[in-house]
Amino acid sequence: MNTEVAPINNLSEVLRTLDASVAPSTQLAYTQALTTLQSRFSEKGWALYPEGEEGQLDASLFTQQLLSYLQERKDERVTLSTINKTVSALKFDASRRSPLALGLLNGELVSQFLAGLTRRHAREETPHKAHAFTVEQLHQVHAHLRDDSRPRAVRDRALIAVGIAAALRASSISELKLKDVNRTRTYDGLLLRVRFSKTDQTANGVDIPVKAAPSSRICPVKALDAWLSVLEAQGITREANPEFPLFPVMRGEQVKHTEMKHPAVSITKLLRDTLVSAQIVSRTGSEAFSSHSLRSTFITLSSQKSIPAERIARVSQHQSLSILRGYDRTEIEAFGQAEYLA
């Protein structure tokens, strides 16, 4: 009888499979949150997982340090979503490094603290949602970029047009590849294959229609075709480079072979800089816009044209119509009336 215990030789692959449980963009966000946390802890001389006298995790000190840090971050007016992301990042890390810490993070004390933050946030702060573009602002943005034939302006114009037409999140924009652009058969337009998203954690993928608007000054299909022509002139095509990012990083006017590492930050900067350079709003006014303005614009303008919410949601991939309506920046205005004064 063989009594030898077989070694486990595939732990590295096990870890890779575990990491695949969250999207690459989420992993990046977790890394950023942990880097910020560990930097602050280092300044204070704190260990992320402090040990007690017997080399075990000091549960009390771990919890105290974490809640102190989260309170500091809240007092610095970081968003509630950033704080929740920090806790999620630490849970992800602890699940691999400290089961006891993971238990504490899922425990009653941390849950109560986060619930308290949420209640205080609701009472003390007004949520700031990204502004949607008006049709006039969109025309101004596209006219400004259309006057510039350099590669970056062509890319930016296509990114904005497609991002709005498909109601895409920043992470989805950055993850699009050339292979994900397909021509439609039943009408003039495109199908964009979004392979992974916030509401599709199992990566089933979904095709999002982008219809051409030839009579409009803003045609997302025409804008994208112009950008694909720029790439093709550089020898980058769907057939030869299917995995190439649809909207890659650019250094000046040079196209890089990498996708955006921080898409929400990069696209927010792109939008704000364009609004300012086109003299549509001031630098301060531009801060009301972010990468989320793309989704908000599609939903708001579609709603203004009386497109049914269910049809809008087929594009935006919202599973909850109540959440979708939260993106519509003019829906509440529809209830305004002055008949009571008549």
Image (cartoon, rainbow, N blue to C red):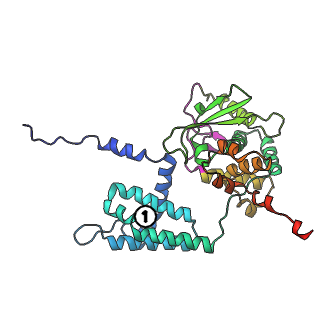
Residue 171: image x %, image y %? Answer: 58, 47
Choose top left, top right, bottom left or bottom right for residue 220.
top right
Q: In this view, does 28 lie above or below 36?
A: above
Question: What's the residue at 29%, 68% (across, down)?
Answer: 51
For disc 1, the marked residue is 38
In the structure shown, which secondary structural element does the residue marked by tag 1 occupy?
helix
Question: What's the residue at 36%, 61% (across, down)?
Answer: 102
Q: Is residue 63 above or below residue 208?
A: below
Residue 262: image x %, image y %? Answer: 56, 51
Q: Is residue 53 above or below residue 201?
A: below
Magenta highlight: main SS: loop
Residue range in magenta is 239-263
Q: Quadrant of the N terminus?
A: top left
Q: For the residue carrying disc 1, how many other residues have a C-alpha within 10 Å: few (<14), some (14-19), or many (20+)?
A: some
Amino acid of disc 1: Gln
Task: Give 340 or 161, whichever is nearer the viewer.
Answer: 340
- Kindly tell me whether residue 35 is visible in this rendering: no
